[in-house]
Image: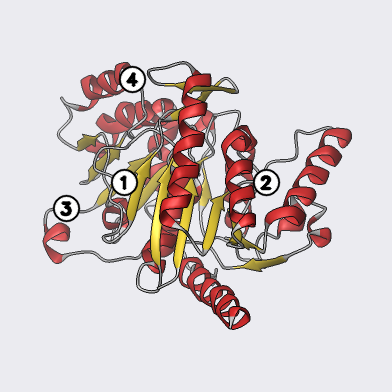
Amino acid sequence: MMKILFYCQYLAGMGHLVRSTEIIRSLVPDFQVGLVIGGEPIEQFQVPDGVEVVYLPALREEAGELIALDRSVELVKVARRQRLLTLFDQFQPDCVITECFPFGKYKMAFELLPLLEQAKATQAKVVCSLRDLIMTQSLSEQGLARKQARILDQIRQFYDLVLCHSDRNLQSLEACFPAAPALPCEVFYTGYVAQSLVVSSEHQQNLQSPRIVASVGGGRYGYSLLKAICEVGPLLQQAIPHRIYAFAGPFMPETDFESLQALATPQPNITLQRFTPHLISFLDGADLSISLGGYNTTMNVLTTQVRSLILPSPSPDQVDEQWLRASRLAQLGAVSMLSPDQLSPSALAHTILQHLQTAQPSHAINLKGAENTTRRLRQLCDQTIALSR
């Protein structure tokens, strides 16, 4: 069985890990997979059975700078680089997948460039796993030119394939990376990567309806939205029978989570949890989703075709990405957008009640990204076997 080493680094939220894990879930029947995780471990997060998981000493990002948990960043960099190269020698992959890099995550070049050199030396295939949007809008003309030149050079040196996890009819790579036609390897559009919808009847029986699901991804930037949800609870309780299931995310600061608990606990219509690995199960059959606009939450909304209100994240690193994705989906009628000025209790209650009366959305967006990724990687590795004979 061919071996794939999948590198995933998340610096603020958990979206990159969720998407990577869903791809790996599809890969496991056909490949031996090693998953390298470079972010903070997430309690209760579930990795598919049969995957060899290696956690590097964790790094995250604050104000544009890398932060280590228990040592200096420089010591962590040295330890991570050595661990990664040793793992490569031990695992001996036929294919290396870097999530996002070299289009993003360039702060990780200190360990990824040596890894790519090692892959090149052993003739392992190298693939980039890329989400639908990369943010270049804030760059100057000169900055964009430099970034494009660097990416083109590194793709030319190391990469055999770019997997773009998008529906090209909705979002093309050229729209945010004008140099895409000059890329020296294939760009394969997989469709969006969405979690599989497998919901147990036992789980559904434990959920009350009508239900509203509020979620904020990893949670670092979700406090304001969940605070508004807690504050609107009394108004909704008077207006309609319902239950709100709210999820704060594993990375929400503890003080913020405790503040939300104080608001939610006295309200019988609100259930607040830190995290669930089964968000899509809560959304399936729900009456309304209220969330930030990260890739994976949005895909869960599209998979379940639940009515939705999406507030683009207030994070300066995510707001453009989330606004672009949500606005294009809103144009198709697949989601609805929520603005910060709609978060007061009266305004939010009005918006929620209004949207509960709308028709359930439908769409024809390609959500087969995980399956199509596996199919294309099988083809790539089969070509490798044929050439080696």
Sequence-wise, the earlier of marks 1 and 2 is 2
Q: CA distance from mark 1 to mark 3?
A: 11 Å
Residue 245, horizontal then vertical, whole percent:
25, 42
Label placed on residue 355? none
Q: Amino acid at mark 3?
A: Leu
**Mark 1 or mark 2: which is in front?**
2
Where 239 falls versus 64 (above or below)? below
Q: Amino acid at mark 1?
A: Val
Residue 94, horizontal then vertical, whole percent:
51, 65
Name the residue at 36% across, 51% down. Answer: 288
Q: How many other residues sit within 10 Å of disc 3, few (<14), some (14-19) or many (≥20)?
A: some
Q: CA distance from mark 1 to mark 2?
A: 33 Å
Q: CA distance from mark 4 to mark 3?
A: 26 Å
Sequence-wise, the earlier of marks 1 and 4 is 1
Sequence-wise, the earlier of marks 4 and 3 is 3
Would residue 327 appear left or right of 278 to someone viewing this image?
A: right
Q: Which residue is mark 4?
A: 256
Q: Amino acid at mark 2?
A: Phe
Q: CA distance from mark 3 to mark 2?
A: 41 Å
Q: Secondary structure at mark 2?
A: loop
Name the residue at 83% across, 38% down. Answer: 146
Q: How many other residues sit within 10 Å of disc 2, few (<14), some (14-19) or many (≥20)?
A: many
Q: CA distance from mark 1 to mark 4?
A: 19 Å
Residue 225, horizontal then vertical, whole percent:
41, 31
Q: Which residue is mark 1?
A: 213
Residue 237 found in image quarter: top left
Q: How many other residues sit within 10 Å of disc 1, few (<14), some (14-19) or many (≥20)?
A: many
Sequence-wise, the earlier of marks 1 and 3 is 3
Q: Are marks 1 and 2 in contact (CB under 8 Å)?
A: no
Q: Which residue is mark 2?
A: 103
Q: Secondary structure at mark 4?
A: helix
